[in-house]
Image (cartoon, grey):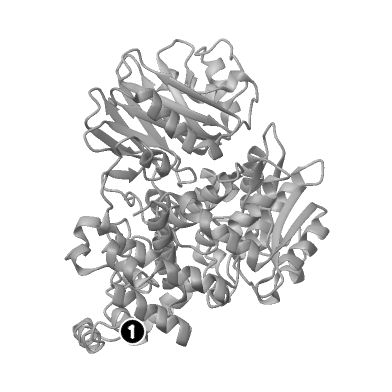
Amino acid sequence: MCGIAGLCNWGDGWKENIEKMNEKMYHRGPDAGGIWTSDEHSVVLGHRRLSIVDLTPAGAQPMESHNGRYVMAFNGEIYNYRTVRDRLLRDNRVTAFRGTSDTEVLLEAVCAYGVKETLRMIKGMFAFAVYDKKERALSLARDRVGEKPLYYGFTGAEGFVFASDLNSIAALDGFDNPLNTHVLKQYFRYGYIPAPYTIYENIYKLEPGKMLIIKSPFNNYNSYCYWSMEEAAVYGQEHLFHGNEEEAADELERLLKESIRGQMVADVPVGAFLSAGIDSSTVVSLMQSLSGKRVKSFTIGMWDEKFNEARIAREIAQHLGTEHTELYITEEDARSVIPLLAGMFGEPYADSSQIPTYLVSRMTREHVTVSLSGDGGDELFGGYNTYTSVERIWNRTKKIPGVVRRPASALLGAACGGKTGAMDTRARLLGARSVEDMYLRSEIGEGLEIVRKEHRLPNMEGCRTIMDTYQTGLLREPQHNLMLMDLLMYHPDDILNKVDRTAMSVSLETRVPMLDKDVVEFAWTLPLSYKKKDGVTKKILRDVLYRYVPRELMERPKKGFSIPLHKWLKEPKLRQWAEGLIDKTVLDRQGILDTDVVWRIWDDYIRRDIWRVQIWYILMFQEWMEYTGR
């Protein structure tokens, strides 16, 4: 795990600026740093290294290919690099390797087969930049599901830039790209800024499964899709698995073991996060079954039993025989993290589970350098109850003819007088045109107009996301469409974003076995009944897990990975912090948020305990504004 950065056509000051970019990513790679520049300085690559595989200088980056034509800066892990290495040797494309790093294998594969063919053959989590000196072409690529970040774009009158960390771009001399206030509609709807947008104009996120090519004179680029979650889902549902449920569980277990076996490979200590949930318990169970020694597992607990899963996680760890470590966190622990959040993410981000995720990552990093995670199970195997409830509401709503529903929705919305609340939500849901549209309309921040009128787009055409263009009924099963929608945006832009940024802030590499290409593609071949049956979610994952852990140990109410943040926000210390961020004079000076709306929401929150999630969206935006001095 590392951090990468680069400049094209930057001109004078390139050395100082690439050093600044590297320094901003020190937490992503504290073990070493490197810089490479072309002869005329038109292309500059930077790298910070967290040594995981091949700890010797032979793994240092940026790295030049054996023939000297290509140079690469790479962030991530290629789990099947040994297979790719064997192919290179078998095809006589390489006679010998200088070291044992996956970076060298990836680079030589690009040299031998080209970037596009290499992307098709590798399995892993990654973001990389590779420069072809002969063609004077720079290629950027990001992994299939979006585990690793990559930002890119143009900065003012200067050239093209890219980096693993948005703060690295913002640190450049003279960086003055305006705030992209148009995307704030999406931020206050979802609590994060969806790809391809960022908080800055002309700076973008490279989307999962895509590559970008920019050639000299580096003033224009083209992007290509080399793998598509949508295509994988459509293909899988058109080619359903024909075995019974037990055979499906056998195959899933085999694929997960293969994925976990590859992801346990490292030249540094490896462990895993363990909650009381199905996903992480499955990962740790399979890890322990594959390991010749006790797996290191980690969890955090709360003294408030309403939020505490540590006791159950400990019982699971004891049953599996792992070397288990737990940390009980206090309000003071959580409060101490809040000032760090804006710097971790580089732009407004407001999933409050960012706090416990950071704390468990920090504790885990004291013991290991790599930790496996159970993320992905809910979206791939139907773990959210929301999928069922939205389909149920839609099935009732669609019985009312659209010619009646839509005018009624407009009238009810008008009756709300611009106020948000339960009636406004019902009005929006009543106007839904499909189950997918209803899912989007059910978003917590949908309909909230927190941003001042002058910053609002008259419509969303200028800032559309993949959700706004999702094809209605793409998959046969309504709930499969909702799962796919989450995997296209919520999962990479919220969940994976959170895990990467919090863990890398303490130099911990995280790996997600359920997002292995073969596991993902197999999951899409499963009928919905294999995932959800008789009110049981993630049925097939449970079938695998119960081969290792007693059913009665797992079938308990899920408490979630959360903290009592909203109780704490009303207590003096955090309330004073919050009201300082939304001070009316501050909001008026900034001129972005509607001061009256913000304070109406805050008053409702204090008096009626509503708008819990939206309050955190507002506070995290204001915390980021304060962090950047705006």
Q: Which quarter of the rendering shows the C terminus?
A: bottom left
Left or right of 137 in this view: 227? right
Q: Is residue 168 visible?
A: yes
Q: Is residue 244 visible?
A: no
Q: Which residue is mark 1?
A: 426
Q: Residue furthest front?
A: 585
Q: Dividing the picture into quarters, in which one does residue 260 lie?
A: top right
Q: Which quarter of the rendering shows the N terminus?
A: top right
Seen at 63% across and 59% down, the residue is 279
Asked whether 140 or 218 is in front, the reply is 218
- Amino acid residing under circle 1: Arg
- Where's residue 304, x and y in %? 69, 74
- Where's residue 278, x and y in %? 65, 62
Seen at 63% across and 72% down, the residue is 559
Q: In the rendered view, would you say 3 is above or below 361?
A: above
- Where's residue 146, x and y in %? 45, 46
Seen at 37% across and 56% down, the residue is 193
Left or right of 447 in this view: 540? right
Q: In the rendered view, would you say 436 is above or below 497?
A: below
Q: In the rendered view, would you say 175 is above or below 566?
A: above
Asked whether 576 or 251 is in front, the reply is 576
Left or right of 313 in this view: 18? left
The tally of labels here is 1
Q: In the rendered view, would you say 558 is above or below 61?
A: below
Q: Residue furthest left?
A: 458
Asked whether 525 or 311 is in front, the reply is 311
Asked whether 198 or 176 is in front, the reply is 176
Density class for disc 1 (Cα within 10 Å; few <14, some 14-19, many ≥20) is some
Secondary element under disc 1, as helix, strand or loop, is: helix
Q: Dividing the picture into quarters, in which one does residue 325 lie?
A: bottom right
- Where's residue 436, x and y in %? 34, 68
